[in-house]
Image (spheres, helix red, strand yellow):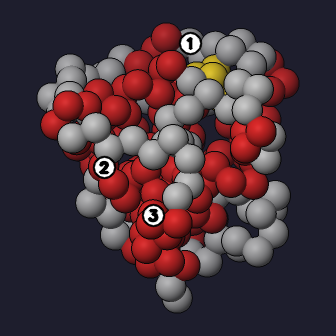
Amino acid sequence: MKIGEDKKIKAVIRKLGRDILVTESFQSEVNYIQHGEIDCYEHSLAVTYMCVYLARKFRLRVDLRSVVRGALLHDYFLYDWHDDVAWHRLHGYHHARTSLITACKDFPMNRTEKQIIFRHMFPLNISRFPNSKEAALVCMADKICATIETVHRKRYDPIIYEGLRLPVEVPMSDLRGRRPSILRRDEIKCLTQAQEK
């Protein structure tokens, strides 16, 4: 299996995640490196593709819409964690929380999608065990893709973008400049909702 080659999987991603894919803010993830030469945008597409692939291959009964949306937004932190800034040093432990807060500000999300984002860094964040099939699927797909990206240290085939790089319909100006640069106390409400059981 080559990530990005199945047009049916990409059609599912396009259908279920279109409102995210067409935003300038999501597409701005190309400005932030994730692993090696892979940017957050490319990584998010790969993880989402892997999730749909695994769900179909193993015939998993999951809320596929939540899986696609949660996977697209799981690393929606919108900063370069490689910058030499003190609070970036613990990026692995904190970026799931920052991604959740940023995603809550920019997109309507259900409880499952919030859980996916908040719990995708298990087992690094040992207390955030994936508590749904959807969260476990994204967590596993994220680890698979991160391993591939770290070991191979090269970009995915450009085929991954075909059909998923949609024209921007929602510019960042429509979001009224909402961009958290760091976690603030007044942003905890969204986080608290995600931790509800």
- For badge 1, the amino acid type reads Asp
Which residue, given by chain and number where applicable, does mark 2 sit on? Answer: 106
Whole-percent x and y of residue 195?
A: 55, 79
Labels 3 and 1 touching (C-beta < 8 A)? no
Query: Which SS class for mark 3?
Result: helix
Asked which secondary structure carries label 2, the reply is helix
- Give percent across and percent down for residue 90: 79, 47
Could you tell which of marks 2 and 3 lies nearer the N-terminus? 2
Q: Residue at x 81, y 58 (%)?
A: 124
Q: Amino acid at mark 2?
A: Asp
3D distance between C-alphas at marks 3 and 1: 37 Å
113 sits left or right of 144 in the view: left
**Viewer-nearest of discs 1 and 2:** 2
**Local SS, label 1:** loop
Left or right: where 100 falls relative to 127: left
**Which residue is denoted by mark 1 in the rendering?**
157
Residue 187's disc number: 3
Q: Amino acid at mark 3?
A: Glu
Residue at the (39%, 41%) spot, across then down: 179
State whether residue 63 is above or below residue 192: above
